[in-house]
Image (tube, rainbow, N blue to C red):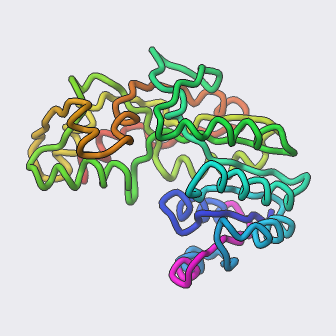
Amino acid sequence: MKVFITGASGYIGKAAVAALLRHGHVVEALARTDTSAAAVRETGATPVSGGLSDLDVLTAAASRADAVIHLAQADSAEADLAAATAMQDGIGAGTYVHTGGTWVYGDTDGIADEDAAWNPPSIVAWRKGVEEKVLPRGRSVVIRPGLLYGGENRLIDIFFTRPGRERGAIAYLGDGTNHWSLVHVDDLAELYVAALNAKAGSVYNGVGGVDPTTYEIATAISHGAGLEGKTVSLSLDEARAQMGPIADAFALDQRFTPARAQAELGWTPRHTDPLAIFAQG
C-alpha cells in the first residue's frame, strides 16, 4: 500500500514510518524544511516538500496514495481541519487516519473505552469540532493516543524529567494517586498500521492497558534519572505556573482499555511494564 503521512520527522512519525516500512508499505511524507526532508529520507520514506498550510500539496500527495495518516500538529483547529479536509479530498475512497488524543475525555472515573463522554481540559477542547467534521467523511478513522513513553519520550521529558534533574526530585501533581493511561510509541506505531484496514468511522484509543499512578511514574523516572527515587508534590496552581495549561491535562485521572483495537484490528500492545522502562532512564 502507498501511504502519505504528515509529521513523519516527529516523535510518533519516525516510529510510524518504521512500522509502515516493516509491513511492506511505501511511504511519502510531508517535509516543511530541508532538515525535515533529510530526516524523512533517513527513515526510508520519500519527502514531499510543503507544510500543513499548503493545501494543494496535501491534496495532490493524498491523491497519489492508497491511505493517509495525519500525525502533524497544526497551529489551530481551523488549520488542522483545513489540512484534514484537503487530504480527505485527495484520498477519496482510500483510508484517512486522523490523530486525536485521550485527554479529550477528562477524568474517567475508572476504566473507560472509546464511548466515554468528553470532558476535555481547555488545551485539547478544540479537537471535538475537528473530529466531528472529519469522521463522517469517506473512509475515515480516528486514533486517540494515550500519553506516550519510550524513545525520545518528549512530553514527559520536557515537563517532568528535565525540570526534575534541575531541582533534584521528580514532580507529581497533588497526592499522586491520579492515573496516566500510557502507550509505548512503538506499540502506537503498530496501531496506525493496523488502522489502515479499519472500517470507516472507527475510533480507537491507542493505550497500552497499563495505567500507573503519577506517584509511581515519578518514582520510576526519578530512579532512571539517577535521583534515587526522590519526588516532590506540586499543587495544581504550582504546576500551572511552571507548565502552563498542559498542567490540567497532566492532572487528569485516566484509565482506558485497548480492547476495541484488540478485537477489531488484532492489535496487542507488547510493552506492558512502563515503570521498568522509566526506571531504566
Q: Is residue 280 left or right of residue 112?
A: left
Chain part drawn in magenta: 23-38
Q: Quadrant of residue 58?
A: bottom right
Q: Is residue 40 above or below residue 140?
A: below
Q: Quadrant of residue 6?
A: bottom right
35 up-or-down from 160: above or below: below
Relative depth, front residue between 15 and 130: 130
Side of 187 relative to 22 (left or right): left
Q: Quadrant of the N terminus?
A: bottom right
Q: How many marks?
A: 0
Query: Residue drawn 37% across and 51% down?
Result: 155
Rendered location of residue 240, percent (x, y): 28, 39
Q: Tell me, yes or no, whether the highlighted magenta stretch contains residue 249.
A: no
Q: Quadrant of residue 134?
A: top right
Residue 174 picture location, percent across and down: 22, 26
The answer to whether residue 46 shows anywhere in this view is: no
Residue sitting at 52 percent across and 36 percent down? 207
11 or 123: nearer the viewer: 123
